[in-house]
Image (spheres, rainbow, N blue to C red):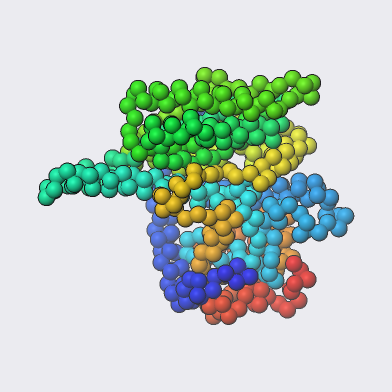
Amino acid sequence: MNPSGVPSPSQHMTAERLHAAVAAKRSVAAEAASEPRSGEPWEKTNKITPALSRVDLRRLAYGRRAASRKILVRYSGGEKYGLDPIKLPRCARCGQPVESGVGVMTDGEKARFTGTMLCGSIWACPTCSAIIRHERAHEVALAIGNHAEKLRREAADQWQADHEGRQLPPELAVSDGFGYYLFGTLTLRHDRTMPLAMTLDAILKGWTKLINGKPWKKAVERWKIRGFVRAIEVTYGRNGWHPHIHFVIFLDGELDNEQQRAMHDWMLDRWKTMVERVAKAYRKQDGNPYNVAPNDEHGIDLQFKAGKDAGTAAAEYITKVQGDKGSVTLAQEIARGDIKDGRSGSVNPFQLLDSGCLGLSDFQREDLWLEYWQATLRRRCITWSRGLKEDMEVEELEDEELAQKADELPGLVGYVVSNKVYKDVRKRTPELLADALEAAEHEDWQEVARLLPGGVILNDEQQDMIADGDAKPGDFLPLPDSFQDM
């Protein structure tokens, strides 16, 4: 990708093919938009936030990104003292222009900005987190499907070896009945006196100890464990910070009831032992140890599922996920920590950026957000056991690479705005950025120009020049707008 953020023809396609692709997507999007929407707002007893439209989610994300930036700018010294933007924390620079103009691109279905920076933070960036977690959810779903197919092929090969010359039974011809999974959540005791950095350390070190050593190696052999995916979710509520682990273990064989009970008891006992062991390193100011040991009721939740469809429907935490009831997948539960509301009385960290959250003062919310940002720096949110991605034919990409990959999707730039206008909107009325993208998805460039004034609506020839790599969006702005506006 060239520095403007626009794909070159060698990376994707020619302008002619790009126009055709955009037109095709536009037709599909228009047809989908004409279909009636289904679903009613969730009842309060379900503890699910009503599903929001894409533009509403974008408005939330851009507003929260601006709120986070404001907090981090103040933390870093403040703009009025001549703060160098380059020295800001990386997630505070997300969306910052990196060229002499910001383009608005659409592929006929979705729209995005070009010529801006992506920070790639899955933890602390409301916009990048959504992109990365969406891609990670796809990875988990792909792995589940590939795992089921691998087991089907193994069973089919064995059957044919045992029944030479006979036709393969129908149940061995499709993978829907294959795939065995253990979905679980691990947690620990927590209260308002416990710093997030401490509880994150305890839960992550506890997990590391759980999946290492001779006991784990024996468990792998005993219960035919192929590997696992582990994700961290953090919420905040009346009892303070609550980090917990979600995981899915891939099993190469089905476990009967007795084996399931044995595995449940083993994991609960080992989890309690490991957490208690690592917790000894943490002390309160008075010298007494923190009590983080999980109990039998809340320390661990395990669910055994069989079959491809069962695997994708394994998440039992549907009451925490914002989406259509019944549509929450295992992949979403594992990866999509950005859209969870948390249980009653608790919120996900991004909600701390919303004014009035939990009745907290602005100072309290900002203090909590800084604590969260600092505690999650340089930590991995979603990890896979060694070799599982390769085994399940899932590409190995870092968070930043996933965000960049999504930013490289082909499309046509229909509008370009000066950095000065874009930065002012990004800082003062960030929700308008979401509205501009919504308008671009409907190719309403006049509305885009109204929301981001002073720019240029590009004609087909100009769009083709950008698509072919012969020009950058900023080349079509009036001459006064140059790098001094960056």
Q: Quadrant of residue 436?
A: bottom right
- Viewer can see residue 165: yes
Give whichever of 92, 64 is nearer the camera.
Answer: 92
Above or below residue 94? Residue 163 is: above
* Number of callouts: 0
Q: Quadrant of residue 16?
A: bottom left
Which residue is rendered at x = 70% and y = 43% of the image?
373
**Is residue 9 or residue 16 the one in the foreground?**
9
On the image, which quarter does residue 116 sit in? bottom right
Viewer-closest of 455 and 102: 102
Q: Is residue 255 left or right of residue 111?
A: left
Report x, y in % for residue 264: 44, 25
As drawn, which residue projects farthest toward the left?
165
Image quarter where the C terminus lies is bottom right
Q: In this orientation, does residue 243 appear?
A: no
For the point 76% across and 54% down, which residue is it? 88
Q: Is residue 276 left or right of residue 286?
A: left
- Residue at 51%, 22% in the rendered image: 269
Relative horizontal placement of residue 321, taking residue 435 as reference (left or right): left
Q: Is residue 297 above or below residue 58?
A: above
Q: Position of residue 31 (x, y in %)?
A: 39, 58
Q: Position of residue 126 (x, y in %)?
A: 62, 48
- In the rendering, at what x and y percent does residue 330 appear? 44, 40
Residue at the front extreme, as displayed? 214
Quadrant housing the N terminus = bottom right
